[in-house]
Image: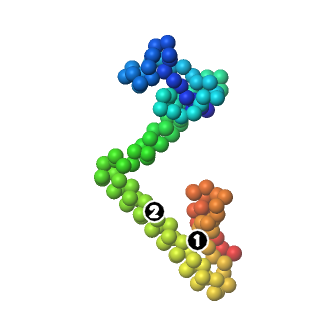
Amino acid sequence: MGLMKRVDPDPDHYNNYASKDAQRPKNVIMCKPNQQIASSEGFLTFIIPKSAGATLKEQIYLGIGVFGMMFFMLFRVWPEWMRLAVWYISWYFLVFLIGTAIVRVIVWFICWHFGIDFWIFPNYWADEDSILDSFRPILSLE
């Protein structure tokens, strides 16, 4: 898949790193492996080698990932309505998760007194499962 590499403006085209042209260079050179550190004089770029067999699907996923990262890193400059919408969605999702946890324990406790081991979302707290697998199966009865 893509690799993140540091590149510098090509010294054959740009004499001074601080010049206006070198700030947005059209010609760059790859830095040596021992110089792959972030600095104010270089740029970081994604390189997708053709020999690695990167498919179009992987390139699209890489683009979505980079766009998504930048989108969420710029949260402070989002419009107010968008920040408020994300806050409401997060709040109601948290209320749903806590409410579900409380309801499932209350139902289990009532059924346990009758000798029935009944769980709603039995994988709710399973860390080894994915998020969607936490809600499968819906009911468990033993």
**What residue appears at the point 48 percent right and 17 percent down from the top-left corner?**
27
Q: Which mark is residue 58?
A: none
For the question of whether residue 7 can be seen, the reply is yes
Q: Is residue 82 left or right of residue 131?
A: left
The residue tagged with tag 1: helix, strand or loop?
strand
Type of residue at label 1? Ile
Q: Residue at x 60, y 66 (%)?
A: 124
Q: Residue beneath label 1, please?
A: 120
The quarter holding residue 90 reads bottom left
For disc 1, the neighbor class at 10 Å (few under 14, some 14 to 19, many from 20) is: many
Q: Residue furthest top?
A: 12
Side (left or right) of 51 relative to 132: right
Q: For residue 33, what is the image quadrant?
A: top right
Residue type for callout 2 = Phe
Give the total number of marks visible in the rendering.
2
Q: Position of residue 30 (x, y in %)?
A: 57, 22
Q: Nearer the viewer, residue 134 or 5?
A: 5
Residue 130, above or below 48: below
Residue 56 can be seen, yes or no: no
Q: Residue at x 30, y 52 (%)?
A: 80
Work out which residue is located at the far bottom of the displayed protein and give it. Answer: 113
State the residue position of label 2.
93
Q: Nearer the N terminus, badge 2 or badge 1?
A: 2
Q: Position of residue 77 (x, y in %)?
A: 34, 46
